Amino acid sequence: MPRYTVHIRDEWLAVPCRDPTYTIQWLGYEALKRYTKNKPDNGGINAVKDIRFVARRCQGQGLLDGDDTIEDVLEDNDFVEIAIEGDTMSPDFIPYQPGVSHLTAAYRESDDNLFLDGNSLTSTDLVNLGRGLYKIKLTSEAENGVVKSRELLDTIVKENKVVYGITTGFGKFARTVIPVHKLKELQENLVRSHSAGVGNPLSPERTRMLLALRINVLAKGYSGISLETLHRMIQAFNASCLSFVPEKGTVGASGDLAPLSHLALGLMGEGKMWSPKSGWADAKYVLEAHGLKPISLKPKEGLALINGTQMITSLGAEAVERAQAIARQADIIAAITLEVLKGTSKAFDSDIHALRPHPGQIEVAMRFRALLDSDHHPSEIAESHRFCDRVQDAYTMRCCPQVHGIVNDTIDFTQKIINTEINSATDNPMVFAERGETISGGNFHGEYPAKALDFLAIGVHELAAISERRIERLCNPSLSELPAFLVNEGGLNSGFMIAHCTAASLVSENKVLCHPSSVDSLSTSAATEDHVSMGGWAARKALRVVEHVEQVLAIELLAACQGIEFLRPLRTTTPLEKVYDLVRSVVKPWIKDRFMSPDIEAVHRLLLDQKVWNVAQPYIEKYNMELLPESRPISPTAFSLDPPASPRKRIRLE
């Protein structure tokens, strides 16, 4: 018999339906009857039949027509919200957050598994797990390590030993010994009391990343988690049952306590939870709808679930991956701008950059040579000004290898730290089964990823800073030989005037966001945690900086392609014409003023999906492969869409 979970005011009700041809109106009234049944005053509802209400699916908040049959608009175990007309009571319901989630649109569970061992996960893997491309399984080696670690903890409890976090309180209460019969309550209280975050919840993708990373760290076998609890976490991940995790509230030591506590709270069946099937609902109902049981905490397991740097690191992994994607696409966009502004490619000569052999600088210069006028790819635009009297270009064009180059090197540096952190045990105390002891330390301190992500924000921001100056040159007729603001009938049309202002505003905002958060520290927990990293904010603002960089470069790409319109019928090089065609597949040329935001969003999506890179990358790779081995500046692996494999054993896919 189909069953539907209906939310009315502050209660969730399970409503069976014998006949799916009944209407939504019937479902609403049946739920209202059940709601009023056990209320002393009928919940203030005198006559259910006279009540008027609105019904909507919890997933996506779609309104339901009362005359529609249940079988036409709902699936078995769907979640429905009933809002009583004129009701002043708070529905205690979390609406779906703004923004598009990959997991909400036609979500399908993946058939592919990623095997975690605690040692081999990369930032790329983690982002793909967040996007729902894989389910999780543990390697047999990881399972054995988890079992041995738990056996030691069970022995400690059985022998009534006094060990921090296992048989004692936490932080300032480390010397308070807890009776054995209250150890389960100790762990549950820890999770509940530490679930004190505020702000909007993390997106489903980011919560999946957070949960996957915590699973990976626990799989190392140094946290004392039981295999049963870890398996339940994996089951929740594979079903995308995701806890409500507020984005604010961590100081980054002792780990990300607040967000990880919220993550654990939902797994315990408390608080709120989201799944593609249910939308937001009470955690116990979401787990039940997916046939899952809440975790029941054993000694030390609460501490094992909440102590670590996984919030900083998971958001940092996304920031690194997006930074890497936009950095290599920035080279392509800048190359188009240089063509439109009739710049020269002489500044990218390999002999110049060999004299200052920073890896990023050499790589960027090579990309420019691969994309611009050469024997490989002649450009009619370049040929048209070959004998002009210009000696050299402005810094925003001439110095791209030097400016973009350090961004690439900064990203590589940050990615190494993030990948190390992804596969690090950051719990406390550590459980060393082979030594038969637990040891307290400070691996939970988030200084490493916090400092690296502050550095990442500062580095990546420069892509937007130099891009905004190139946009100015494209829009300013005294600098470009193009119509003012890249539009005909200027005055009647404003063209790219305010798009440039948007870019300038984002660059200015980034300047404030680039102030490092990790230089700050506030003592917490009664001076027990007297130096903290503030890494949660470092990660969140790094992500915001990267997003702004993407948007500024989207505006530059739009402007550069518009500039090409004024140089026709001349054509640029083959790879840059391919990029132009890609942009024109989603955005028409700017003939007269129109609503511009959708154009910017469309090109931003091209950059997010790395389509600009995918179009140009084969040409760059071919150019690089055709160089003589002794003069080849970098390895062909630098152009793979995936980062090089970790020296550690790679994760198995099934």
Image: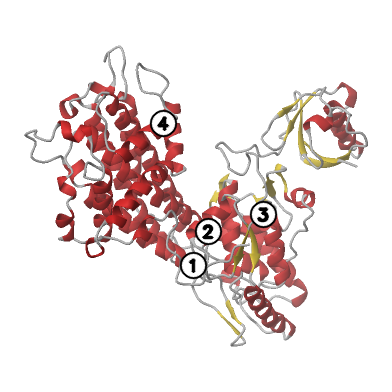
- The residue tagged with tag 3: helix, strand or loop? loop
Count neighbours of disc 4 (C-alpha within 10 A) and say few if under 14, some if 14 to 19, many if 20 or more: many
Residue named by callout 2? 125
Amino acid type shown at disc 1: Glu
Label ID, residue 111: 3
Which badge, 2 or 1, comes first in the chain's sequence?
2
Q: CA distance from mark 3 to mark 2?
A: 16 Å
Which badge, 1 or 4, comes first in the chain's sequence?
1
Q: Are marks 4 and 3 in contact (CB under 8 Å)?
A: no
Q: Nearer the viewer, mark 3 or mark 1?
A: 3
Amino acid type shown at disc 3: Asp
Give the quadrant of residue 608.
top left
Q: CA distance from mark 4 to mark 3?
A: 35 Å
Placement of 376 over or under 293, stated as above or below? above
- The residue tagged with tag 2: helix, strand or loop? helix
Left or right: 498, with 180 as reference point: left
Q: CA distance from mark 2 to mark 1?
A: 32 Å
Which badge, 4 or 3, comes first in the chain's sequence?
3
Residue named by callout 1? 529
Label ID, residue 600: 4
- The residue tagged with tag 1: helix, strand or loop? loop
Amino acid type shown at disc 4: Ile
Which badge, 3 or 2, comes first in the chain's sequence?
3
Count neighbours of disc 1 (C-alpha within 10 A) and say few if under 14, some if 14 to 19, many if 20 or more: some
